Image: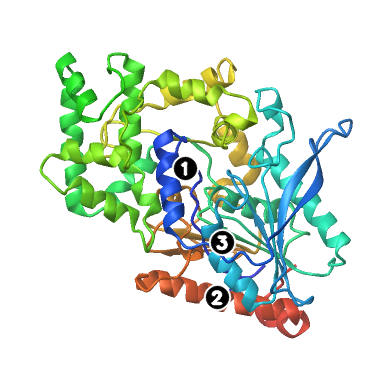
Amino acid sequence: MFRNSVLVLFIVYLAAVSAVINTPLYKRRFAKERQLLPQPPLMSNETFWFTQLVDHFDPNNDETFQQQYQVIDDYFDGTGPIFFFLAGEAPMGFFNFQEVQIWNWADKFNALYVVLEHRFYGASNPTNDFSTPNLRYLTSQQALADAANFLTSFKAERGLESAPVVVFGCSYSGALSAWFRLKYPQLVVASVAPSGPVLAQLNYTGYYSQFSNSAAPDCVAAAQTATNQIMALTTSKSGRDQLAKTFNSCSNLENPRDLYYFLYTLTEALGSADQMNNPPTWGLNTTCQTLTQTSSLLDNWAQIVAGGQTGCQDYSLKSFIDSMRKTNSKDQDGSRSWLWQTCVEFGYFSTTYPGTSVFPPTLNVEEQVKWCEEIFDIKGMTPNIAWTNSYYGGQQIQGSNIMFTNGLLDPWHLLSVNEPNLEGTVQAATYEAGHCGTLIQSTSIDPPSLIAARAQKLSQFNEMHTLIRFPCDNVEKRGSWT
């Protein structure tokens, strides 16, 4: 326990939680964001393969697969801690820009930095395809067991059994980090869980309602005005034809489900910009500038949706469903895997209803849940939200030495932990920026609250590092880190 003590440290961005459902537009935007942000140095970055169990919970299944991991030992002096980063819902290395500060801390504390790729993402595939029967091995419980099995073997093979380990993550993997400390406390001394959405939620209206609190008032008003214009046009054939023309649709919008997907894509393009609102790109501010640049709000919104693409936009729901049904690993970039996890464990469906946000109020949860059934061919498929929250504890997680950090402009903070618990075993800090903001590269235009958050976490980490190295001198003062 550590009532007034230390824990932690930092913060990250995700992205991800690949947040909303991964439409082509969302992936294009995120790829652009990655290109604009600094990456950590290459240095040693050695890649290795670990022989991992396919199923940790069936003693009769001895099948294995090769799981990819990286070791960065440039800063390690043989006596420092191990920083263990759990990669999330993308290939290992995809989120490098969210690890910059961890690299800096590894340098400062002579740490060995290890990154483990998540099963069913990147090159770490337990099965030969992503068919629905094979995806039964894709759960957060299997991923945590992967990390436990790997870490135990890794430390033994390298003679590092006594080295203390701090587990890191970001967004979904930030939640994994917290759950890893909760379920395997004997393996790590602490968890850093930036922007970790530990509360599973089926009908997540907060994702788009947050926009009204994050964006400037003129942007919020423009979004509401534009939404009113769009909804008026959807009521007639001529209006829908005008929308198809304005937003450069490849086909008409007469199919009601295509119209839903059209409105979903438009909402995602504008309404998810607050998640990425970190320096130096300030994605929300840039998006709002585009929305309000002229009085032709729908043309401005169409420019945001296009994202620099010149071809027509495919708003056909069938095209999206068909792309997600592909089971060959070469045809997938992690989107099918992440959708499976949301459809089975987490929900996170971003929805709108009258009065919940400034966006089209017709994005009901039933339609998005239906996509799960159609993509995975499981009749009545619905995520088991109650079980997930019961198993992990939701926002009342009962672990110790866990630190959550959240940007208040990021919609995912609503599903994370933003205040420390009464016992002081779970700590939390917030700051005025976006998703996982303090793990990206520092800039000259960082807001004071972000600078202060980084300084606070570094100070706490200094205390924790001292305690790990000299436990007998510090345990009475600062509490136990076991």
Q: CA distance from mark 3 to mark 2?
A: 15 Å
| Residue 162: assigned label | none
Nearest the camera: 310 or 39?
Answer: 310
Type of amino acid at the residue the image marks with label 1: Ala
Residue where numbered disc 1 is placed: 19
Mark before the other along the chain sequence, 3 or 2: 3
Q: How many marks?
A: 3
Type of amino acid at the residue the image marks with label 3: Glu
Q: CA distance from mark 3 to mark 1?
A: 18 Å
Residue 136 position by quadrant:
top right
Mark before the other along the chain sequence, 1 or 2: 1
How packed is label 3: few (under 14 Cα within 10 Å), some, or many (20 or more)?
many
Q: Is residue 243 visible?
A: yes
Residue where numbered disc 2 is placed: 458
The vertical placement of 228 against 36, above or below, is: above
Quadrant of the rendering where the N terminus is positioned: bottom right
Q: Residues at badges 1 and 2 in contact (C-beta under 8 Å)? A: no
Residue where numbered disc 3 is placed: 99
Nearest the camera: 106 or 176?
Answer: 106
Secondary element at image label 3: loop
